[in-house]
Amino acid sequence: MCELLAMSANVPTDIVFSFTGLAERGGVTGPHVDGWGITFYEGKGSRTFKDACPSSESHVAQLIKSYPIKSEVVVSHIRQANRGCVSLENTHPFTRELWGRYWTYAHNGQLSDYQQKFAVRRYQPVGDTDSELAFCWILEKVVERFGDQAPADLLPVYRFIATLADEIRALGVFNMILSDGEHLMSYCSNNLCHITRRAPFGKAKLIDTDVVIDFDKETTPNDIVTVIATRPLTDNEDWHILKPGEWKLFARGELVLTQEG
Amino acid sequence: MCELLAMSANVPTDIVFSFTGLAERGGVTGPHVDGWGITFYEGKGSRTFKDACPSSESHVAQLIKSYPIKSEVVVSHIRQANRGCVSLENTHPFTRELWGRYWTYAHNGQLSDYQQKFAVRRYQPVGDTDSELAFCWILEKVVERFGDQAPADLLPVYRFIATLADEIRALGVFNMILSDGEHLMSYCSNNLCHITRRAPFGKAKLIDTDVVIDFDKETTPNDIVTVIATRPLTDNEDWHILKPGEWKLFARGELVLTQEG
């Protein structure tokens, strides 16, 4: 299995603290040694840092831990390969353009008997993971349903994507993070939780390494920051654990849609 | 204007030497202070490092200069904005997926009266540069002509792309680098040159900063490495200067097709 980490914030925020905890799971406190990746959105643009070597040893991961990139949306993944070999093309997150936005996706879990279901044409996988193929299939279905021109409102698109995720979950384990740079979706199969931090901010202590942060010193009173992870990253805060099949859509740090919405 | 740098090699090769020269032009020996980017292909996978700040000051550029990523194909660009504001989404190279390959593109030059010509539907620009729109239009036309399934032979595709580039060049200045991860195309409007290094290797001296490299110590006798740049990067070697409208296609360091081919 793999580890997921994502963030949605109402002001450009760095993820150095959370990534520091996650990166330890890539070879130190966790067995996820088959590469890692992190995508930062800055406005409409995005950049992804990836490495096929363990995050705990990676030069690039070291940069991410020491160089605070301020971002409104972050998607990150560290990998323990199950389907697909260890290589850069199989390293999450995966990105494709649709409607003039970069869509970024990462998956935790494993699927079976999926080849026949995931017929794709316009969006084709570059690597050979079940994860990337499922992402391509989601985009294929979205274009089939909504066409080439972006709808004015993306919420119906995310409701539709949730039904696709339900179908995929029937094939195995499918914890998913998906973003178009403005919205951030978390879809839970069995391992996904989140926390929304806002004023009054307190201290947080990482589980995976001996680091404590005082968010009160790092933030302004108006900041709202939601962090999503496969497992809680801190042991002194209340993380909300998602149920199987539950999903949430965030924008600017706030919840904007759930499966009941 | 901007600066382009690209490499095609028959063995994974690092581009630290050439990038060190190029990065100086981003704020030290050149005025290209509006961001930079570099894409490395490693197998079918690719990763892009980008920054909207000058390459001579960038933390990320510092990493690229100190951490030798071995790659068969590299595409790089440093930007002086003419069309489109200074932002991550306007920073080259741009990447899109087609036929299960990542296509990476960078442009030097400026186009006029292009909006009407570049009607796009499937591939839409995220930023607001003429460059990205021209790239989307090229891919749109390629799909229109060759369909959704990859042709067995990509050479006819590149011949077709050259005719599209001729059309684009009629709108202004269009020096282009394009790669699918296996092939590397250079299309010249007014500023593009290349050099192919092979045994016996010698020493090379950068123009933009006081660095000399002895390739004989860095290579094996079978290595073949082609470097493409807008202007020669070294002053003790013979760079081949492309003529207006001339283009070359390289693979594994060797020339595989030109406009006469």
Image (spheres, coloured by chain):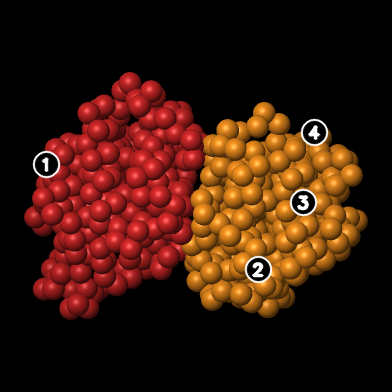
Chain colours: A red, B orange
* Image position of A13 with respect to A246: above or below: below
Q: Amino acid type of disc 2?
A: Tyr
Q: Amino acid type of disc 4?
A: Asn
Report, in whole angstroms, how far the alpha carbon at label 2 lies from the one at label 1: 51 Å
Report, in whole angstroms, how far the alpha carbon at label 4 lies from the one at label 1: 57 Å
Q: Which mark, by number, is residue A184?
A: none
Q: Position of residue A59 (x, y in %)?
A: 48, 51
Q: Is residue A243 left or right of residue B170?
A: left
The one nearer the camera, A219 or A244, is A244
Circle 4 is placed at which residue position?
B222
Q: Which mark, by number, is residue B163?
A: 3
Residue B72 in sight in this render: no
Residue B243 falls in image quadrant: bottom right
Residue at 70% over, 65% down: B108
Q: Chain of mark 3?
A: B
Q: Position of residue A6 (x, y in %)?
A: 29, 53
Q: Nearer the viewer, mark 2 or mark 4?
A: 2
Q: Chain of mark 1?
A: A
Report, in whole angstroms, how far the alpha carbon at label 3 lies from the one at label 1: 55 Å
Circle 1 is placed at which residue position?
A243
Residue at 25% over, 63% down: A251
Are labels 2 and 1 assigned to the same chain?
Answer: no
Q: Position of residue B135 (x, y in %)?
A: 62, 56
Residue B229 falls in image quadrant: bottom right
